[in-house]
Image (cartoon, rainbow, N blue to C red):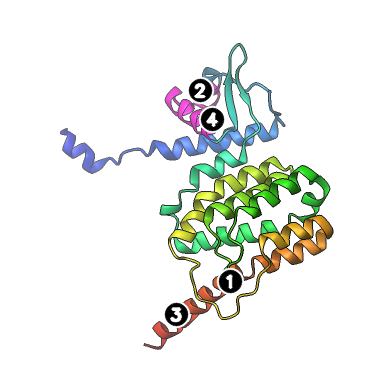
Amino acid sequence: MSTEDLSTLLQAVDTRSLVDKVEMNLIEFFIKKELQPGDSIPKEMELVNTMGVSRTVIRESLNRLKTMGIIESKKHKGTIIKSPDLSVLLQKSMIPHILDNSTLKDIFELRLVLEIGMGDLIFRRITPKDIEELEAIVDEEPEFSEDILFDISHEIKFHGKLYEITGNETLRNFQQILLPVFNYVYDSGLIHKPIENKRYISHKGIVDTLKNGSPDEFRMAMRKHLENHFQRIFALEQHGKKDSASTDSK
């Protein structure tokens, strides 16, 4: 029988689906065995014999888990369980130019919510040196702007310092991951929507609150600081509703 006849009668086996199944089975195995970081997992040939699949499939499944940061190879120990770095996992998918506007908006909203909610961590861990560094950042900024859209470098320095002060490494890494997304949101014009009422508290006002206020006052100040961002987001949503209604009426 010719190769052409065979390809007509037989469909190619999708090995990726088999790799997916092995990957999920391995994760379930790790959970059921309650394996902890540092624990060894079965060797490749043990997995091949137990699961009844080829070594190639096992290797590809293990490579996926390594890429996800769930396992790693250690000299003299073989392959062991690893505590995944959430920031690394997110970084692999945070490619601004292949994210649609809806996703970019969602991510930007996430940033706003995080920054409003950081008050308790910041007040518990802030030091006089942190205040000095924030004041130095503010001193380098333009004295006044009626718009919340500061120069992006000033925004990154000031807000990046706030994330650092929280002392939460995951939160800090998360902010670093989102920076390219924020840049794209600014550069793309996604949030450059005109607004009628420009109300905000400046970076200097935030520093004053950190020096003399409370976590609750910080949350209120940060919410006002980000007010124009919220207004632009809501304006975008309203514009989208109008466009949708206009399309439906045609």
Amino acid found under the numbered disc labelled 2: Val
Task: Specify the quadrant of the image occupied by residue 167.
Answer: top right
Disc 1 + disc 2, Cβ < 8 Å: no
Q: Residue at x 55, y 61 (%)?
A: 150
Identify the mark nearer the N-term, 1 or 3.
Answer: 1
How far apart are the alpha carbons under marks 2 and 4? 18 Å
Identify the mark nearer the N-term, 1 or 2.
Answer: 2
Amino acid found under the numbered disc labelled 3: Ser
Q: Residues within 10 Å of mark 4 (few under 14, many from 20)?
A: some
Q: Which residue is mark 2?
A: 48
Task: Tell me: residue 151, above or below residue 245.
Answer: above
Amino acid found under the numbered disc labelled 4: Lys
Q: Which residue is mark 4?
A: 66
For the record, the magenta segment spans 47-67
Identify the mark nearer the N-term, 1 or 4.
Answer: 4
Q: Residues within 10 Å of mark 1 (few under 14, many from 20)?
A: few
Label 2 sits on a secondary structure element that is helix
Q: Which residue is mark 1?
A: 146
Asked whether residue 54 is drawn in magenta, I would say yes
Of badges 3 and 2, nearer the viewer stands 3
